[in-house]
Image: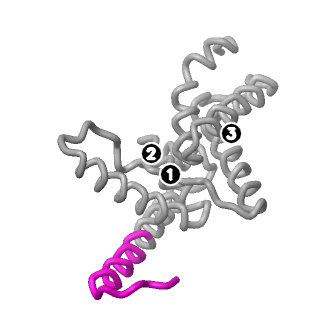
């Protein structure tokens, strides 16, 4: 078993990355990340077999709690942008287009139910295997596959709906 310091050093990046993707806010991500390790270090780790999965499960739960608190507080501020990686654009116009696409994607992701958003974020944002996602969320592998399929399908459907309205020069109202 790793010491407290070794545990923190080994997994701080993974935990922060998940928190950052799920909150889309660096300050909130740092706070939640700190809370994850405080919570984890206060628990008995003798029964923990997979430390990374255990810590990411704690992080996902705390991010979900954070989101629900914000949602109840009358504002939504959990956004996850993980498919549009920042890069060095060659032209200023490229940066504007990338930011617009990133914002649109973040909104599509934000509109998903929490379970679907969490599953997609773990899979694509953190690059975890389907099995790792299942272990972290403590759900069957088939459920992970189903949530990913359903989440992507919902995002695709909404995107196509927006494109069809925009293509007609009309405003779409939800």
Task: Give the residue at x 60% y 37%.
Answer: 56
Residue 39 is drawn in which quadrant?
top right
Could you say which disc has been placed on residue 159 in the image? none
> What residue is pinned by disc 2?
125
Real-space Cα separation, disc 3 to disc 1, in angstroms: 18 Å
* Frontmost residue, 11 versus 91: 91
The location of residue 37, given as percent across then percent down, is 70, 27
Q: Are marks 2 and 1 in contact (CB under 8 Å)?
A: yes
Q: Secondary structure at mark 3?
A: helix
| Quadrant (top left/top right/bottom left/bottom right) for the N terminus | top right
The residues colored magenta run 155-174
Q: Secondary structure at mark 1?
A: loop
Task: Give the residue at x 63% y 45%.
Answer: 60
Could you say which disc has been placed on residue 80 in the image? 1
Question: Mark 1 Cα within 10 Å, few/some/many (few <14, many 20+)?
Answer: many
From this viewpoint, which residue is outermost toward the left? 90
Q: Secondary structure at mark 2?
A: helix
User: Is 32 situated left or right of 136 in this image?
Assistant: right
Q: Earlier in the sequence, mark 2 or mark 3?
A: 3
Task: Give the residue at x 47% y 69%.
Answer: 150
Q: Is residue 90 above or below residue 46?
A: below
> What residue is pinned by disc 3?
58
Residue 102 is drawn in which quadrant?
bottom left
User: Is 8 situated left or right of 117 in this image?
Assistant: right
Q: Is residue 33 above or below residue 105?
A: above
């Amino acid at each position: 078993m790793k010491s407290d310091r070794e545990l923190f050093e080994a997994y701080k990046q993974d935990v922060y990355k998940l928190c950052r993707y799920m909150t889309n806010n660096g300050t909130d991500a740092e706070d939640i990340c700190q809370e994850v390790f405080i919570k984890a270090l206060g628990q008995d780790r003798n029964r923990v077999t997979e430390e990374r999965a255990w810590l990411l499960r704690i992080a996902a739960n705390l991010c979900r709690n954070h989101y629900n608190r914000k949602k109840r507080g009358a504002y939504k501020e959990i956004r996850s942008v993980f498919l549009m990686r920042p890069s060095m654009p060659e032209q200023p116009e490229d940066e504007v287009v990338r930011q617009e696409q990133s914002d649109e994607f973040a909104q599509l992701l934000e509109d998903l139910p929490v379970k679907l958003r969490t599953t997609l974020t773990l899979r694509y944002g953190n690059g975890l295997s389907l099995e790792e996602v299942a272990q972290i969320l403590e759900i069957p592998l088939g459920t992970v596959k189903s949530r990913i399929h359903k989440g992507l399908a919902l995002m695709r459907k909404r995107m196509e709906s927006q494109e069809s309205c925009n293509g007609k020069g009309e405003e779409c109202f939800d």
